[in-house]
Amino acid sequence: MDGVAAIEIYGLTGEPGALVAAKEHHGVGDLLAGGGAGLGVPLGVWAAVRRGKWVDQVVRVIGLVGYSVPIFWLGLMGLVLFYAKLDWVGGPGRIDVVYEFTLVPVTGFLLLDTAMAGEWDAFGNALSHLILPASLLGYFSLAYISRMTRSFMLEQLSQEYVTAARIKGRSFWGAVWLHAFPNIMVPLITVIGLSYASLLEGAVLTETVFAWPGLGLYITRALFNSDMNAVLGGTVLVGAVFIGVNLFCDLLYKIFDPRLRNA
């Protein structure tokens, strides 16, 4: 055996714990596809630029709610409102039982498998099951990133070099994006990396609430079954992801910080 399979930690499944966890990790990958970094950064910049205005107040409330309210409670309330009451989204699980045994898994991603098979009814059903848990994890990430981006930008916008750029004729948004924003890239990369780690933690609760077959649900079931070997394998995998994210962030520092390029 090689890779994660080389770790001689066997769970109740009869396979190495880390290997089984890696197989189940595709569920977390699905949920993380709609992460909040793409929206959180521009929202944080916009809030900092419009400090004290209604936009700033809205973004601050979004950040406060998303960062302070437990994600499992938001998940339960989302199921009650959007699934049980309004019937706008699918319920727990990745797909309805009527479609579950008619699909031949190819990639492990239901959206891709259903699209490749031309099963568009099953595709829509899988998408409806994905919307709510993915939106919750994306919102959790968006809240943290927008809050920190706003804080970083407020500090930079108060610096003298931004005023000097405006005096030299640079437009307001040019000073924001071409002068202030590049100077927050290093701490912002750290925040985005930490938000990914937080999403892994949140995925444990989210996958449990939504019965999503991913790494979080796998570790939770292993804990309930007192399968410590499987828990240890999952923990090793999560630790490896943390280390990989930190190393990747360190590499990005050299790209965005000129002071580190020749260090």
Image: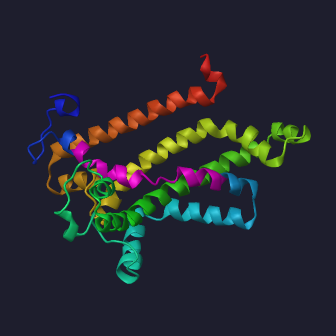
Which residue occupies the extreme top position in the image?
262
Q: Quick check: 78 above or below 85?
A: above
Residue at 60% over, 54% down: 147
Q: Quick check: 84 above or below 98?
A: below
The quarter holding residue 176 reads: top right
| Relative horizontal placement of residue 32, taking residue 46 as reference (left or right) | left
The quarter holding residue 9 reads: top left
Query: Which x, y percent locates residue 42?
Result: 64, 52
Residue at 27% over, 47% down: 107
Q: Foreground: 262 or 124?
A: 124
Magenta highlight range: 21-44
Judging from the image, the colouring scheme is rainbow
Say if residue 158 shows up in the picture: no
Query: Which x, y percent locates residue 143?
Result: 54, 57
Say if residue 26 shows up in the picture: yes
Q: Main secondary structure of the magenta part?
A: helix
Q: Quadrant of the N terminus?
A: top left
40 in magenta:
yes
Which residue occupies the extreme bottom position in the image?
85
The quarter holding residue 54 reads: bottom right
Could you tell me how many numbered marks the image carries?
A: 0
Q: Quadrant of the C terminus?
A: top right
Query: Which x, y percent locates residue 14?
Result: 8, 44
Q: Quick check: 93 above or below 199?
A: below
| Relative horizontal placement of residue 90, taking residue 35 as reference (left or right) | left
Query: Which x, y percent locates residue 25?
Result: 29, 47
134 in magenta:
no
Residue at 48% over, 48% down: 195
Q: Foreground: 121 or 185?
A: 121
Q: Foreground: 56 or 119?
A: 119
